[in-house]
Amino acid sequence: MFRALFGQVTGGTAVKNITPNELQEKITNKQPILVLDVRQPEEYAHQGHVEGSRLMPLGSLRHRMSELPHGMPIVCVCRSGARSRTACELLQSQGFADVTNLGGGMIAWKRARLPHQ
């Protein structure tokens, strides 16, 4: 129950979650945010993705973190929310302070009937 309310705690750092509708509201309101999709290129291309999101597969994230802005909120996205949670933990461990996981991933995004490419 506490994980559902506050996010999973790993090594003393909680991973925040955001719902698809909350993320869509931020995008609609043009809030500065980086939507980081950590799936494989095939998934991103063929299974849909959040418009304007940036693809950076989880396997390459550790080596490409320098490409990410430290001062901007980042929302990590994957298919179901598991890989993106791992991405959030990795980013937090490397000093990224404002990192959030899209709970339920693209599955939840599509169930909410939100726009995707």
Image (cartoon, rainbow, N blue to C red):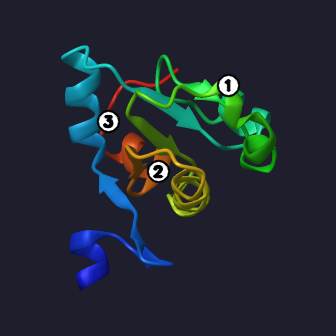
* Circle nearer the viewer, 1 or 3: 1
Give x and y (percent) for residue 50: 47, 28
Residue at the spot x=25%, y=71% of the render? 6
- The mark that comes first in sequence, 1 or 3, is 1
- Which of the labelled discs sits on residue 49, or is there none? none
Taking depth in this image into account, of 37 and 73 the one nearest to the observer is 73
* Relative vertical location of residue 12 with respect to residue 33 in this rendering, above or below: below
Mark 2 surroundings: few (<14), some (14-19) or many (≥20) residues within 10 A: many
**How many numbered circles are shown?**
3
| Structural crowding at the residue carrying mark 3, measured as other residues with C-alpha within 10 Å and reported as few (<14), some (14–19) or many (≥20) | few
Tell me which amino acid carries mark 2.
Gly
Report how far apart the C-alphas of labels 1 and 2 lie in the structure: 23 Å
Question: Seen in the image, is 66 located left or right of residue 95?
Answer: right
Task: Tell me the SS state at disc 3.
Answer: loop
Residue at 23%, 39% in the rendered image: 21
Image disc number at residue 105: 2
Mark 3 lies on residue: 113
- Amino acid type of disc 1? Glu
- Classify 101 as above or below 66: below
* Element assignment for label 1: helix
**Which dot marks residue 67?**
1
Quadrant of residue 56 within the rendered picture: top right
- Residue drawn 67% across and 25% down? 67
Which callout, 1 or 2, points at the residue further toward the start of the chain? Answer: 1
User: Which is nearer the eye, 107 or 5?
Assistant: 5
Disc 1 and disc 3: Cα gap in Å? Answer: 31 Å
SS class, disc 2:
helix
- Name the residue type under label 3: Arg
For the residues labelled 1 and 3, say whether their Cβ atoms are less than 8 Å apart.
no
The N terminus - image quarter: bottom left
**Residue situated in front as seen by the camera: 116 or 31:** 31
